[in-house]
Amino acid sequence: MTARLSMRTRRSPVRIKSPFNVLIGVLSVCAGIALWQYAASELTSSLLFPGPVKVAKALSSRSGLDLIGALGTTLKRVALGFALGSAVGATTGILAGNVKWLRTLVEPYVHFLRSIATLAWAGPALIWFGIGNITTEFLIFYSTVFIVLLNSIVGVTSIDEQRIQMARSFGATRLDVFLQIVLPGSFGYVLSGMRLAMSFSVATAISAEMLFGTNGVGYVIYESRLYFNFETIFAGLVILGVTGLVLDKIFTGVQFGLFARYRQGR
Amino acid sequence: MTTSRSHATIGILRKLRRVAITVVAFALSLVGLCFAWSLAAISFDAQNLFPGPLASLARFGELMANGELLIASLYSLMRIFVGFAIGCALGVIAGSLMGMSRIVRAALAPYIHFIRFIPPVAWFAPVLLWVGAGEAGKIILIIDTTVFIVAINTMLGVHAINVDKIRMALAMGATRAQLFLRIILPGAAAYIFTGMRLAMGNSFATIVAAELLASTSGLGFMITNAQNLLEVPTMFAAILMLGILGYISDVVLESLVRRFGGRYLLESKGG
Amino acid sequence: MTRAHATPLHIAPAVGCMGKAPNAEYIALKDVTFSYPGQHPVLTDFNLTVARGELLVIVGESGCGKTTALNLIAGFESAQKGTVSIDGEPITGPGPDRIVVFQGDRSLLGWLTALHNIEFGLKLAGMSRQESRRRALEMLDRVGLAGQGDKYPHELSGGMKQRIQLARALVSLQRVLLMDEPFAAVDALTRTTLQDQLLSLLANADATVVFITHDIAEAVTLADRVIVMRRGAVRHTLEVELPRPRTRGSAEFASFYDKVERALRQP
């Protein structure tokens, strides 16, 4: 007859990190791993689909260490392009947010360029800069800059006009307003743009390594397919997942912990 | 003495003036850009390595006329749409379940918040070995790209539905199915379409990467092929096409977000 | 105390017409104890009856448990102890025999037009498109919003939105109408209009109404009987023996107003 949904007929918010939920999560993951092991050993050829045990072995073996080394290479790559892209994006974005004509000028191009998949530029970039780090950094830069730029613009434009008026009424100069109101107010947005761009820049780095790289996690994973080395592939995927998770957590930690007072909208 | 009508006219004129200034400024910047672009192109020796705007547009026109560009686009789009449709369906179902049930959410959350950080392209390595370099592999990649974002956004959307709507429907005698189809889905629609919008952008990126790596058709292949022939104009044409397709799909999805009341969600798309 | 019944507003069988309870105890809460998880009980050994066809108004300060009592009748919550029943049958969940009108506009569906919102309950019940549209249009007219049917909620004022809610509830009304401060978010002028409109819409309906409000004048205007709750119990009951239609400025009105106000202020 009529539905009796036990959830959500109350107005109380859903608690996210209650111990009950954590328990369910842990149980679920254990069940998942067990299922994975079962599927890998019973249902398919374990050559094609390694179970968790094999993957764990691969991680803790020599190739595991190699992967960690490759991860370092990849991360260094990402760090450079990401830092550059964020710096340029944030500066341009904050400027554009402040200066109306700059913003109207810049925005359409940014939107257009951003809607082009980064890796499409690998074609021309390889011809111009050759196979090497410059191309990779260019691509990583490209994947970062527009996202940070647009978020920075939003950050500046979302600052409540009232705040600026308030500061002015206290006699603040334009520079004061910029340093004391605009910068802190948009900082949270810049961070969230960076957080968003982070996963894209890693993905771009991996794609570039797969396409024309000679080192890094992407290269190792893609190369391993030539030898049907599924253990290494899966180990690499796990490492990527963990890396992404850790990086994201670092960003949320910075956003909501260290720089919590700069949270969006505060 | 000015009447209210002339006040209104002044207001409209002011607006027109502002729009005109914007348009002129944009046109000027475009011209300036093309000029700078042409200069840069000329300073490169081989026209083929860095074509100017005219050469690029000419090539674009050529490739459109002979259908190559359209065919390549269709291949890429077809792969995206199939994977996108499946991924969205799975994502909406999973996300709705997560949004409606605390237990499902707690059970699925660890998977979603781990697997979504693995770049979809990375999966190409095992997928190529399992299903080869055909359509299935690329579609699987698109499903991976889509499902997690859509699931998360759907879950957020379901959570955001005000409990009064659910109570109202229950008090009207809604069955489970009716509650889902008439309240939950439309209520979360703005979030779902926002997730789809994000996923669409990512899907384009994934398909290009996949086609660059292992394909014999599609826009990515067009680029790779042109690369072997050192034909940058063709690359530019494909890139322009990608931009156009990306823009159109984004506009369509954005209007869907708006239709379902998502005015507030459009701001921080990541741009 | 009875209101004139001409032709009923609509004819629909009440759910659970077996198990007839005495008319005076059509809705009954007996010895109900209820608390939200992890909190002190809101209602302890709470007793309340509502007679069939009566318009009961509950007033009380915030936190006195009136909304909780309504939610129990509506079936959104279940009591930990005691029974909540309608026509002798225990209430196990929400249902179309007890339609709810909420405070604010959050229960309106923003993606549907006003007319479609009104039709919502009818569509759920499987009514044909023509029939549901016809009834909805008629009700739209009766709440004074003719011609506004194609507007979306966000294009309507607060008062208009409440009228849509009323229309939606009344067009699907079976036996019981539950209203939780429905006019609280509306300005004072619109409020009195809505009250009058509600009374005229209910005049021909064979409905039992439980209405919650903070507004004493509203209580005296609407109620057959007013109960005052404080801290989870009924402290006072007042029969409002004023003939309808009631004049808000009259001396009799004022005297009932005083009685309610004093009852509210008593410890």
Image (spheres, coloured by chain):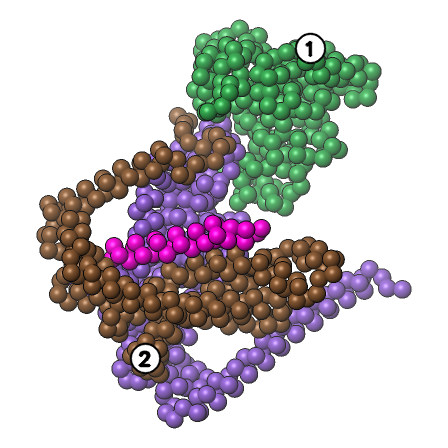
Chain colours: A brown, B purple, C green
Question: Could you say where residue B144 lies in the image, as x and y percent from the top left?
Answer: 30, 55
Is residue B256 a member of the stretch shown in magenta? no
Residue C242 shows in the view: no
Mark 2–mark 1 Cα distance, whole angstroms, equals: 88 Å
Residue carrying label 1: C239
Front-lying residue, B44 or B177: B44
Density class for disc 1 (Cα within 10 Å; few <14, some 14-19, many ≥20) is some
Magenta stretch bounds: A237-266
Secondary structure found at label 1: strand
The quadrant of the rendering that contains the N terminus of chain B is bottom right
Q: Residue furthest bottom?
A: B45
Q: Is residue B88 above or below residue A146?
A: above
Apparent side of residue A229 relative to residue A157 in the rendered image (left or right): left
Q: Is residue B165 above or below residue B14?
A: above
Is residue A249 a member of the stretch shown in magenta? yes
The image quadrant of residue A180 is bottom right
Subunit bearing disc 2 = A
The structure residue drawn at horizontal position 32% and vertical position 43%, both measured from the top left corner, is: B108
Subunit bearing disc 1 = C
Density class for disc 2 (Cα within 10 Å; few <14, some 14-19, many ≥20) is some
Apparent side of residue C183 relative to residue B137 in the rendered image (left or right): right
Residue carrying label 2: A126
The structure residue drawn at horizontal position 68% and vertical position 58%, both measured from the top left corner, is: A164
The structure residue drawn at horizontal position 30% and vertical position 59%, both measured from the top left corner, is: B120
Front-lying residue, A118 or B221: A118
Q: Residue furthest top?
A: C22
Q: Amino acid at mark 1?
A: Glu
Residue C116 shows in the view: yes
